[in-house]
Amino acid sequence: MFVAWIKSVVIDKENSDKSKKRLVLGCGALVYDLLSLIKQNPLLSDKVNLQCLPASWHNTPQLIAPGIEEYLSENAHLYEDVYIAYADCGTGGSLDRVIEKYGAKRIEGAHCYEFFAGKDVFEKLSEEELGTFYLTDYLVKNFNRIMIKGLGLDKNPELFEVYFEHYKKLVYLAQTENEQWQKDAQKYAKDFGFDYEYRFVGTGNLDSVFEDIDIETLEIKR
Amino acid sequence: MSEEDDFDLNELDDKELVEQIQDDLYDGLDAEVTEGTEILLSRGWDANDVLGEALVAGMKIVGVDFRDGILFVPEVLKCAGAMKGGMGILRPILAESAEDTSLGKFVIGTVKGDIHDIGKNLVAMMCEGAGFEVINLGINNPVENYLEAIDEHEPVIVGMSALLTTTMPYMGVVVEEMEKRGLRKDVHIMCGGAPLNQEFADSIGVPAYGRDAARSSEMAEEYVRGLDKKRGHR
């Protein structure tokens, strides 16, 4: 059962009529960014119910579409509309099939790196160095859990070559400006033997999950 | 393994030893798989039988459990590492064998724009275990690399791999070029990679989509055996 792993992020304290709300069902790795956007526009909290799926699915994308389908099958009917705060995220179109089934929408792009950086910037980075490994705020903060333990490198460091043989560079696509995280990311790049680049990109196109929501003071800062 | 569980592989009979090698392979125990392989050979087993009954059969169990979500990538990579240990012993023996048991050549590579090769390398290893002579083109292959490899090696199968939704459409470019050059009648095409599915394979005209390494090697073998059967009936 995937539902047991779903984190509920309650932003509508009175739990008012869901039928007038948008369900934003997102990746747990985006929860702080989504909450920060809502904080900038508090009126959104009356219009949106945010639910997040496990961020650890970053390493097991085959779980994403079935997990979302299971949640939507039980909850989608309670809401006026549904927005999935994921890109394709390695689901190879299976997420899109679920989205189509429920008449929902998702963020455009192949993955969060693309919608955070923007398509053009991401393409340019990939062209400059195909072997680029990307980190976001979430991945920097949770590097040991998601990248080291998640890939089994803590127990099997010999797998490093298998995973990263072809990578040469680490680009930290930052959502917030945080000196400690920049230092951490730089250290991870050094530990892995990669070149390092820092780019502050903010939350990019993540705010599309709030598109067409009718509130008076919607001024999302990018 | 605790000291109490430690035992001498030489004490096992052939059937038990084959099962033990499969268990050790599942647990990613490189040294134990290598030792078990050597013991079977020392008992007079044919290298092809050791490969098929112990190693490939063991990796098929791994493949099924990976597909079913029981094993994840790190565990599968450990298993693959253990299989490599056994393969290291068997490869030179198989190469020197007078009997030609090769199923033919299998050219495999990750497509242009994509540097991911974990799955592709697993397929290559399983296909080698199944009896193919594998030509591994590596990563980031433009169409020219596939065409050159076809010219040079005259493979029975070409396999393409991609991990990214942004790179998988490039497979269609390779298929189209092979079509233009009239190569498709002689070369079977397979594709695979996490974001792919049969629907995508159909859309680019690839007849065989391998959902995982074990299934891909089975499909490749089935294709060649099917060809042999057809030829036999002529």
Image: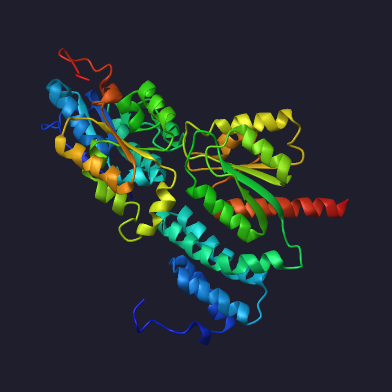
Q: Nearer the viewer, residue B129 or A178?
A: A178
Residue B219, image x, y percentages: 64, 51
Q: Is residue A78 left or right of residue A97?
A: left
Which residue is the extreme one toward the left? A14
Name the image colouring: rainbow
Give the total number of marks visible in the rendering. Answer: 0
Residue B74, image x, y percentages: 40, 56
Which residue is the extreme one toward the right? B234
Say which quadrant the N terminus of chain B sits in: bottom left
Q: Nearer the viewer, residue A216 or B136?
A: B136
Q: Is residue A64 left or right of residue A11?
A: right
Which residue appears at 41% of the width and 25% of the height? A123
User: In the image, is residue B36 above or below residue B100?
Assistant: below
Residue A118, image x, y percentages: 34, 23
Quadrant position of residue B144: top right
Quadrant position of residue A86: top left
Q: Is residue A54 left or right of residue B97?
A: left
Residue A150, image x, y percentages: 32, 51
Q: Is residue A173 visible?
A: yes
Q: Is residue A4 visible?
A: no
User: In the image, is residue B103 above or below residue B169?
Assistant: below
Which residue appears at 41% of the width and 35% of the height? A95
Q: Is residue A142 left or right of residue B6?
A: left
Which residue is the extreme one toward the bottom? B11
Which residue appears at 53% of the width and 66% of the height? B58
